[in-house]
Amino acid sequence: MRKRRQNGSPKRFCDCFRAWRSREATLCGDCRFGKSHRPQGGGGGRTPAGPGRRGRAPHTPAPHPCTRALAGLVGVLTGELRELRDRVRALDDGGRAPLPTAAGFALADRYALLLAGAAVLGVWHHAGEGGDPFLADAAWAAAALHQVARRLGARVPALPRECEARLRQETRARFGTQHSYDLYNTPLYG
């Protein structure tokens, strides 16, 4: 459920989120999906040169490599979803053809992978509201979306070293404290 502001209207996504969805990736320094904020100086990450020129404002620090990787992977999966939509529409033949064909099953499999990617983003988004700091980190979400994109056959660059280092660090910490390797990070006994 969307949080409501004091005036009762739903909380809006920041300009950075809209930019990711429209493939014009510009990020403010510590952007998170759904976090309602105004980048300092206004403009949603635009340069002072004017509204037609996109870029980071001079005061905005560069985003973390894991956040940049996550933004790129969101763009890849968004493109895959658009392609899937077009393929389903072409297969559907105006709503008259049944989808239980070999091609329909393959498209359903692709859709299931895209839903898994959406679930990753949902967990990452809501982890920012408190809870496990690892789940609020973009490193694991970027790694999970990287796997989804590769399963879909998309050509994606390797993950940044910072993402892999953060995953290794968390794995060692959970092994040392005997915690599970799932989203719940529960203690293991025995």
Image (cartoon, grey):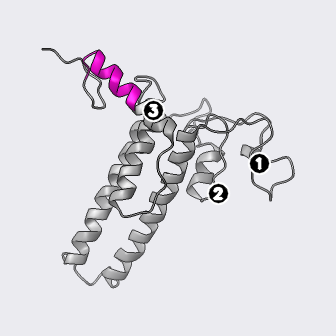
Mark 2 to mark 1: distance in Å? 11 Å
* 169 drawn magenta: yes
Label 1 packing within 10 angstroms: few (<14), some (14-19), many (20+): many
Residue 186: percent from left, percent from top: 25, 21
Identify the residue position indicated by label 2 in the image.
24
Asked whether residue 52 is in view, the answer is yes
Residue 65: percent from left, percent from top: 57, 40
What residue type is disc 3 on? Answer: Ala
Residue 109: percent from left, percent from top: 26, 63
Identify the residue position indicated by label 3 in the image.
165
Range of residues picked out in magenta: 168-179
Identify the residue position indicated by label 1 in the image.
46
Asked whether residue 2 is in view, the answer is no
Q: In which quarter of the image is the N terminus?
A: top left
Q: In which quarter of the image is the C terminus?
A: top left
Label 2 packing within 10 angstroms: few (<14), some (14-19), many (20+): some
- At x 28%, y 21%, the residue is 175
Looking at the image, residue 43 sits to the left or right of residue 75; the answer is: right
Residues at badges 1 and 3 in contact (C-beta under 8 Å)? Answer: no
Task: Give above or below for 7 relative to 46.
Answer: above
Task: Give above or below for 155 relative to 65.
Answer: below
Circle 2: element type: loop
